[in-house]
Amino acid sequence: MVNNLMVNYTDQGADDAPVIIFIHGFPLNKTMWDKQLECLKERYRVIAYDIRGHGESDAGTDDFSMKLFANDLIAFMDMLNVEKATICALSMGGYIALNAMEHYPDRFEALVLADTTCKADTSVAKKKRMATIKNILEKGMLIFAANSVKNMFTPQSFITKENEISAVKQMIINISEESLGCTLLALAARKETCSKLPEIQVPVLILVGEEDKITPPEAAIYMHLRIENSIIHNIGNAAHLSNIENSDDFNTQLKSFLASVYKDYFDNKARMETSVLREIRNKVSMLLSFKSI
Ligand code: MLT
C-alpha cells in the first residue's frame, strides 16, 4: 500500500544491489519496461510500478497531477525502504521524475530521461488534450488506442514489430476511461521544469528516438544544454517508445551509463570478492598442510 492505495509493481534482482526504478509513459503500464528489467536484473535491483490509475494500481480519489504522482513515487520508495535510486523514466514518467527531482533531489542517485520534455503544454496542446477526452467518450477506447500507436512507433515497426504494437494497444485499452481523462487533465495542467534543470546535481542520461514526434530530439537537446552533468544519445530506428522499438540500443546505453554511475560500488564489490576468495584459499592450503604433517 502506498498513500492508502494498492500499487502493482515488479521487484527483481538482489536486495543489496543498486536500485533502478522505472516509470512508464501515458497511458501505458509497467510491462513496457520488461526488456530493460530482463537485461539489468543480474546486476541491479530493478523495480517497475504502475502509476495510480494505470495498469493494475488503484486510482484513488485525489485529482491527478504530476506532483501527486511524484509524491506517490517517494512514498513508494519509503514503503520499499529505498533511500536513493536511479530513476529511469519515459515521457510522462519523465515529467514525474523531473517534478520529484525538483522537490526531493536527495532521493536520486542518477536519472535517465527517455523521450520526454521539461516544457509544459502549449495552449494548442492543451486544447488537443480536451478534444482527445471528447473523442474517447464519443468514439471509444479502440479508436483511441489505434490512433495513439500511430504516433508512438515508426512506420517501419508496423511491419516488423506487430507483437510489440499490439501489446502497447492492449495496455491502452486496459486503462479505464476515467483514469485516462484524469491523466489527460493532469498532463495539460503540468508546469514546466526547464528552469530547474541547472540545479540537477546527479548524472543524467538523455535518450530519444530519432523519429520521436511527440517529444522530439530538439526537446532532448534543450534539456541536455541545461543539465551540466548530462549525456545525450539518439536511438536510431525508433520514435516515441524507443525502449521498445530499439531495445538493443536503449539497453546498451542504459547499461554503460549505469556502469559509470555505480563504478565505485562494483569496483569495491570485486575487491571484496577477491579478498574473500584469497582468505578461503589461504585457509584451505593451511588445512591441507596440517593434514600432510
Ligand atoms: C507519454 O508517452 O507519456 C505521453 O505521450 C506524454 C504526453 O502526451 O505528453
Image (cartoon, rainbow, N blue to C red):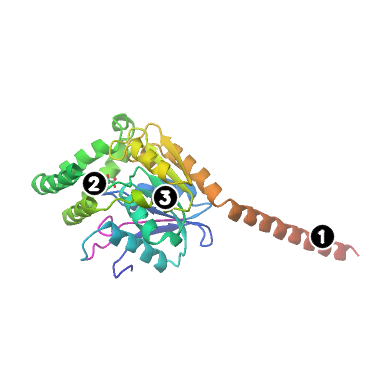
Disc 3 designates what residue? Answer: 198
Q: Residue furthest left?
A: 138
**Mark 2 vs ligand 1: CB under 8 Å?**
yes
Local packing at callout 2 (Cα closer than 10 Å; few below 14, some 14-19, many 20+) is: some
* In front of the other: 84 or 279: 84
Residue at position x 78%, y 63% in the image: 283
Which residue type carries mark 2? Asp
- The x, y position of residue 85, in whole percent, is 46, 58
Sequence order check, earlier mark of 1 and 2:
2
Q: Is 63 rendered above or below residue 153?
A: below
Image position, residue 122 (x, y; %): 22, 44
Check residue 160 for magenta coloring. no
Does residue 177 lie above or below 244 as drawn? below
User: Real-space Cα distance between discs 2 and 3?
Assistant: 21 Å
Judged by depth in the image, the label closer to the viewer, 2 or 3, is 3
Q: Secondary structure at mark 1?
A: helix
**The residue tagged with tag 3: helix, strand or loop?**
helix
Q: Which residues are magenta?
A: 46-60
Q: Nearer the viewer, residue 16 or 203?
A: 203
Magenta-highlighted stretch: main secondary structure? Answer: loop
Location of mark 2 (residue): 121
Q: Amino acid at mark 3?
A: Pro
Earlier in the chain: of badge 2 and badge 3, it is 2
Residue 214 rendering spot, x and y as whole percentages: 28, 39
- List the residue tagged with mark 1: 285
Mark in front: 3 vs 1: 3
Q: Is residue 44 left or right of residue 165?
A: right
Q: Indicate which disc residue 17 carries.
A: none
Q: Quadrant of the C terminus?
A: bottom right
Which amino acid does the dot numbered 1 rest on? Ser
